[in-house]
Amino acid sequence: MGFGHIGLIIVLLLVALVVFGPRRMIEMVTQLGKSLIQTRDALKEMHWSLSSDDENGNPPATTATSTEGERPRVVESAPLKRDPE
């Protein structure tokens, strides 16, 4: 991995900019970001549903650590809100 990979990425981005144009590139990047967010949320929900041990559907308590070196604290996440049908 050297400068060659960065140069290749820059060339590919410039070619894509010429082919698609600046407006279309912005739309494509926006859609890519939305897709990544949806995928991340779906993976979190899948992880939550697989790790849930409570019969009421409540997620298990997780621990969060602080960057200041404090002791971990217990944080309970709220269950997902579902639309009434």
Image (cartoon, rainbow, N blue to C red):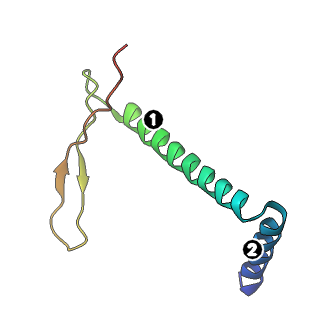
Quarter of the image where one finds residue 9: bottom right
Outermost residue, top side: 85
Residues at marks 2 and 1, CA–CA distance in whole angstroms = 33 Å
Q: Looking at the picture, how far across and down is residue 4, in whole percent?
A: 77, 83
- The residue carrying mark 1 is 46
Quarter of the image where one finds residue 45: top left
Outermost residue, bottom side: 3
Rendered position, 21 above or below 6: above
Q: Quadrant of the C terminus?
A: top left
Q: Quadrant of the N terminus?
A: bottom right
- The residue carrying mark 2 is 9
- Which residue type does callout 2 highlight? Ile
- Which residue type does callout 1 highlight? Met
Quarter of the image where one finds residue 77: top left
Rendered position, 65 above or below 36: below
Residue drawn at x 63%, y 58% is 29
